[in-house]
Amino acid sequence: MSENALQTNTTWNIYKKIAFRFFFLLLPLFIILNNNGSFTFFSGILQLPSLVLHHLIPWFSEHIIHYNYDHTITTNGSGDTSYDWVLLLFIFLISVIGCIIWSVLDRNRKSYNAAYYWLVVLVRFYLAFTLILYGLIKVIKLQFPDPSLNRLLQPFGDASPMGLAWTFLGFSKGYNIFMGLVEVSAVLLLFRRTVVIGAFLSLAATAHVMSMNYFFDVPVKLLSTALVVMSLFILAPHFLTLYRFFIKYENQQLSKMYRPTFKKRWLYISAYGLKYLYITASIGTLLYTFIQQTKIYGSEAPKPFLYGIYDVESMKFRGKTVAPLTSDSTRWKQMVISYAGYARVKTMNDSTYNFSTVFNTKKKEVVFNSQDKESAQYILNYNLTGKDKLIISGLKGKDSISVSFKKKDLKNFRLINRGFHWVSEYPYNR
């Protein structure tokens, strides 16, 4: 190990040693036990602890802290489940107990420079690859899709805070690219000379994500808060220097990071070769995977057959015209085909019904199977006339049904047609 780096021979005070022991346990446990796919080629291995935790955490919750929850629910689209909160408490308690035992058994230790270096390396790589992952899916615009047809029709006040955030963020491709590039800049954390600037950019990116999660009730609060803490942890040794430079305007110089040296050149070449190979392979794999996914998901994915919003012009049931009464829960008002294999129908009283769909384009037939309480099956023929006319007719069970639609022009939505303006004589706030 190098003896001319960051205060290698300086004795740490007791507070610094206790803080180090606590974080040396807390941060690796969080990283290992909260696997989020950041380490591309180790995801399978990092999922193994979950096989034990999915039994241990419910037992700990029920018998130790006496908190009951649905044990079948673990981390899913939400990272703030009861399981996740109890797991965080479990990690915290293990870290506190471990820190106390360690402090008693190793109270004569002067410093932990080498161990601290490797802890920072782990945190740097985890934080960097997490932000690179989330940054790339923003640059390629997979995380926040364009507003869906159902979202465009949804009354503004019916949106959840998270739904509002997703619509806001998904509306602008440019803003996605901007957010993504800031997050991808965390790649600077992977290189020793750019760690500090990388940590600053990571702090800005993670604080932005954390604020969105908190104030729009997005259930990734635990992870985003942890990423902010990790950014601060990396910057912690430089706080006093940065304060003196930015606040007191004193001449300052950042301390060089402690790092190991290699007595043999081939070890040095091998270590750094593996590092850059892993970085390149990981980022390349993520980028390739996300580009492939754009062909299946997101705005680049092919649209389903008859994609669009269809307003009902007229409807007949059992040969009789059904009047468009606003109180009618059976007369159709609108049909939306947004995803392949599915359709949503809104009736005159604004009730909605979901159907699975099977199209036979050769016979111009479609089968609607109800996914709601109604168990009816519709076997229909469809006929397209011009660019915006659609007629479907056939049977609902044993009853005849015929519906005439006019396709809605999506450019009529203000959200879509407003566009960008360099010059605005007045605010266009609608």
Image: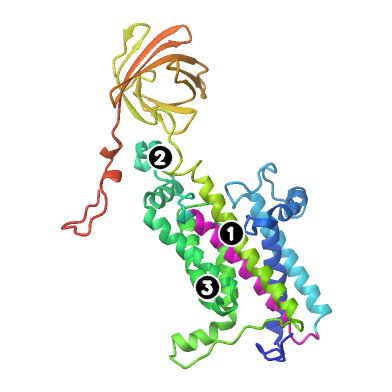
Element class at badge 1: helix
Look at 71% across and 73% down and name the residue there: 271
Q: Nearer the viewer, residue 286 or 17?
A: 286
Q: Is residue 350 above or below residue 103?
A: above
Whether residue 65 is visible: yes
Residue picked out by circle 1: 223
Exactly how many numbered labels are in the figure? 3
Q: Gap in Å between the C-alphas at discs 3 and 1?
A: 19 Å
Residue lying farthest to the right in this orientation: 105
Q: What stretch is highlighted in magenta?
A: 108-137
Residue 186 place in picture, x, y as percent:
53, 68
* Residue 148 image label: 2
Q: Gap in Å between the C-alphas at discs 2 and 3?
A: 35 Å
Q: In this view, does 255 lie above or below 236?
A: below
Q: Disc 2 marks which amino acid?
A: Ser
Query: With 378 as the anchor, is 174 left or right in this view?
Result: left
Query: With 161 as the anchor, is 326 left or right in this view?
Result: left
Residue 344 place in picture, x, y as percent:
43, 28
Look at 22% across and 52% down and name the residue there: 428
* Residue 198 image label: 3
Q: Which of 85 and 352 is in front in this view?
A: 352
Q: Quadrant of residue 92?
A: bottom right
Indicate the colouring scheme.
Answer: rainbow
Residue lying farthest to the front in this orientation: 266
Looking at the image, is mark 3 or mark 1 nearer the viewer? 3
The reply to whether dot 3 and dot 1 touch (C-beta < 8 Å) is no
Q: In this view, does 243 lie above or below 287?
A: below
- Is residue 119 one of those drawn in magenta? yes
Q: Which comes sooner in the sequence, label 3 or label 1?
A: 3
Q: Disc 3 marks which amino acid?
A: Gly
Q: Which comes sooner in the sequence, label 2 or label 3?
A: 2
